[in-house]
Image (cartoon, rainbow, N blue to C red):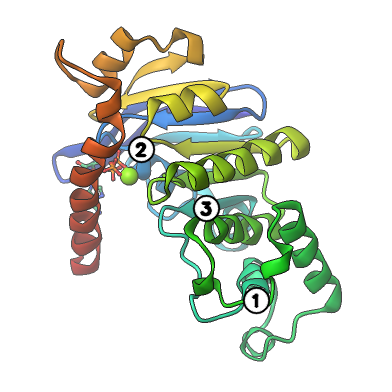
């Protein structure tokens, strides 16, 4: 179903993704873990065609999606919806309009400017919100919702595209444990009930173990672990994170997070500068 072959992405002399290969034969829920700078976000960005690979192939259902252009490329991007740590909603716009934004590619600018969405789509948006337990907030501004609710709005927006794959880049990194749990449960349910593949970059090992069928560990751009939650022992985790004998699993959540936020900022700044 998903066949990644010798995928490489270089930034100058640095290989952010370094000769990555793996195969997923059914729509699983996959967690990608690894310390900051391991290449997790770059991998998702390549898959969604937000950035081009330097080498290799990424075949989905037998087709190398990295060579698609024009409409085929846009269709693929719509087939694999992205969810981000910071939700990327329009804060002052109401929830249902934010969700309808998931159909943006299909409508004219005028339609979206004046919020003239077909009634059927508005119903679909509300049904999806209902499924995620947040229909009662449909008319509120996105900014009035809690982080966990906003992330579920972002998931609803992704579902409007009816994607085959959901790519989530640290979907719970900005959330408190309760909200994090609701969002992970929502992703898991979408996977279980709809059979959609979910690939999530995750920071905490316990989350990856609890919700994912398969875990891929990356270190310095390479895949250093690929297995089931049971196979991801503390020793293996230590290797993935490149930590010493004093490695503690707790360190994979909050402590590393602070450093990551800085790195993410730096990357954003570098991207703007380019
Ligand atoms: N646009 C860019 N230009 C230059 N280098 C980049 C760019 N994007 C990423 N990198 C580099 O590629 C490597 C992998 O970055 P990536 O963002 O994929 O890591 P990550 O595993 O997602 O880390 P984090 O956990 O901090 O989000 C890092 O060394 C980073 O500095
Ligand atoms: Mg990242």
Q: Earlier in the sequence, mark 3 or mark 2?
A: 2
The image shows residue 14, relative to residue 92, as above or below, that is above
Does the closest atom of ligand 1 sit within 8 Å of the Cβ of label 2?
A: yes
**Residue 70 rendering spot, x and y as whole percentages:** 56, 63
Lateral position of residue 264 relative to residue 131, left or right: left
Q: How many marks?
A: 3
Query: Residue at (67%, 50%) from the top-left corner?
Result: 163
Say whether disc 2 or disc 1 marks the residue closer to the N-terminus: 2
The picture places residue 132, in percent across and down from the top left corner, at 70, 52
Question: Is residue 118 left or right of 24 when viewed as pictured?
Answer: right
Residue toward you, 205 or 163? 205
Residue 39 falls in image quadrant: top left
Q: Label 1 belongs to which residue?
A: 97
State the image quarter where residue 115 is shown. Answer: bottom right
Q: What residue did someone put label 2 on?
A: 40
CA distance for labels 3 and 1: 18 Å
- Name which residue lies at 56% across and 45% down: 183
Most foreground residue, 107 or 244: 244
Q: Residue at position x 41%, y 59% from top? A: 86
Q: Which residue is mark 3?
A: 82
Q: Quadrant of ligand 1?
A: top left
The circle drawn on residue 147 is none
Quadrant of the drawing holding the N terminus: top right
Label 3 beta carbon less than 8 Å to ligand 2 = no
Q: Residue furthest front?
A: 178
In the rendered structure, the answer to whether residue 138 lies left or right of residue 171 reads: right
Query: What is the CA distance from the residue labelled 3 to the residue labelled 2?
Result: 14 Å
Callout 1: SS? helix
């Amino acid at each position: 179903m998903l066949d990644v072959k010798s995928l490489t992405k270089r930034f100058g002399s640095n290989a952010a993704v370094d000769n990555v290969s793996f195969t997923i034969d059914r729509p699983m829920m996959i967690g990608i873990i690894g310390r900051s700078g391991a290449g997790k976000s770059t991998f998702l960005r390549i898959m969604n065609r937000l950035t081009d690979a330097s080498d290799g192939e990424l075949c989905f259902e037998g087709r190398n999606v990295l060579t698609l252009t024009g409409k085929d490329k846009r269709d693929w991007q719509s087939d694999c919806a992205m969810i981000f740590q910071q939700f990327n909603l329009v804060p002052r716009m109401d929830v249902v309009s934010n969700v309808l934004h998931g159909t943006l590619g299909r409508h004219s600018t005028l339609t979206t400017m004046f919020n003239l969405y077909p009634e059927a789509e508005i119903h679909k948006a509300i049904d999806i919100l209902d499924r995620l337990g947040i229909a009662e907030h449909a008319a509120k501004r996105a900014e009035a919702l809690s982080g966990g609710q906003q992330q579920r709005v972002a998931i609803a927006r992704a579902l409007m595209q009816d994607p085959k794959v959901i790519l989530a880049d640290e979907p719970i990194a900005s959330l408190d444990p309760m909200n994090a749990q609701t969002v992970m449960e929502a992703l898991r349910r979408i996977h279980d009930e709809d059979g959609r593949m979910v690939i999530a970059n995750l920071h905490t090992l316990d989350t990856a173990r609890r919700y994912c069928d398969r875990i891929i560990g990356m270190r310095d751009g390479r895949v250093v672990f690929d297995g089931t939650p049971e196979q991801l022992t503390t020793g293996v985790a230590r290797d993935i994170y490149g930590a010493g004998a004093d490695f503690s699993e707790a360190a994979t959540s909050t402590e590393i997070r602070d450093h990551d936020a800085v790195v993410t900022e730096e990357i954003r700044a570098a991207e703007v500068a380019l």
